[in-house]
Image (cartoon, rainbow, N blue to C red):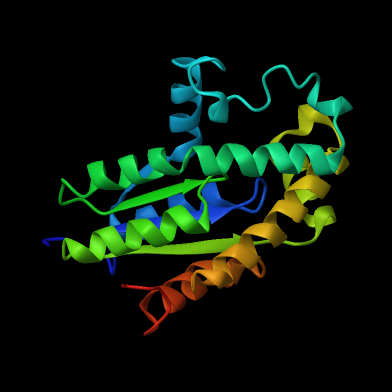
Amino acid sequence: MTHDAPWDILLIGGASGVGKSRLAARLAGVHSAFVVEFDDVVEAVQAITTAEQHPGLHHFDGAGDAADLSADRVLELQIATARALEPAVLGVVRNRLTVDVPAVVEGDYLTPAAAARAIREGSARGRRVRAVFVHEGDPERIALNYASREPEHGVQRERAEISAAYSHRLSREAALHSLPVVDARPWDTLVSRIREVIVEEGAVPLK
């Protein structure tokens, strides 16, 4: 490899509103890396499929207004959609492994299971695929983040509650796959803490 990043592909997972996009941009700037926003991939595959063709990608279709669904139901549908998108995660990783430019892939729908498999596939090809999940369990903090980036939507407290619950779920699943989970706060030290866990021996499963 001709680049000096400590990874060829870095997967950054986490719930909505925890700061993944800003983190990805900062890390990409440090390492001259390419950023893939997995949400763009999600929108693309949903746009070219229907619920009849691929029901796993359209769990929210026909579910009515999301505002009328219970928080538990929204979380259930979000998790089901993330699992259905796991092959797409692996497709992105396999494509990025064909070029010698480090990449940061970030998104709400990156699951620990897909990340662990991507790491194993990268290792089998002699490439450094790493993953980390950013955690924020305080819905009030997430609501403040939403208010900062989307002031036109007002206070999104219920959405923040769902996001915090999803963050806890991802953190538990990441632990089951021996993947590092890093608290989003304090923000000023997040980049350095991410870099530490990525290079820490045994932080990610290689087999």
Residue in the image at 48% along x and 38% along y: 85
Q: Can you say whether 101 is above or below 183 in the image? A: above
User: Where is residue 23 shown, x and y percent of the image?
Assistant: 51, 55
Residue in the image at 30% along x and 59% along y: 31
Horizontal relation, residue 46 to residue 17: left or right: left
Of residues 90 and 191, which is closer to you in this image? 90
User: Where is residue 109 shown, x and y percent of the image?
Assistant: 55, 44
Horizontal relation, residue 170 to residue 125: left or right: right
- Residue 124, by quadrant, is bottom left
Residue in the image at 70% along x and 52% along y: 166
Q: Can you say whether 197 is above or below 27 in the image? A: below
For the N terminus, the quadrant is bottom left
State the count of labels.
Answer: 0
User: Where is residue 33 shown, x and y percent of the image?
Assistant: 30, 51
Q: Can residue 169 be seen in this view?
A: yes
Q: Can you say whether 55 is above or below 82 in the image? A: above
Horizontal relation, residue 141 to residue 87: left or right: right
Of residues 149 and 80, which is closer to you in this image? 80
Of residues 127 and 90, which is closer to you in this image? 90
Q: Can you say whether 87 is above or below 123 in the image? A: above
Q: Can residue 26 be seen in this view?
A: no
For the C terminus, the quadrant is bottom left
Name the outermost residue toward the left.
2
Residue in the image at 66% along x and 39% along y: 78
User: Where is residue 119 shown, x and y percent of the image?
Assistant: 33, 62
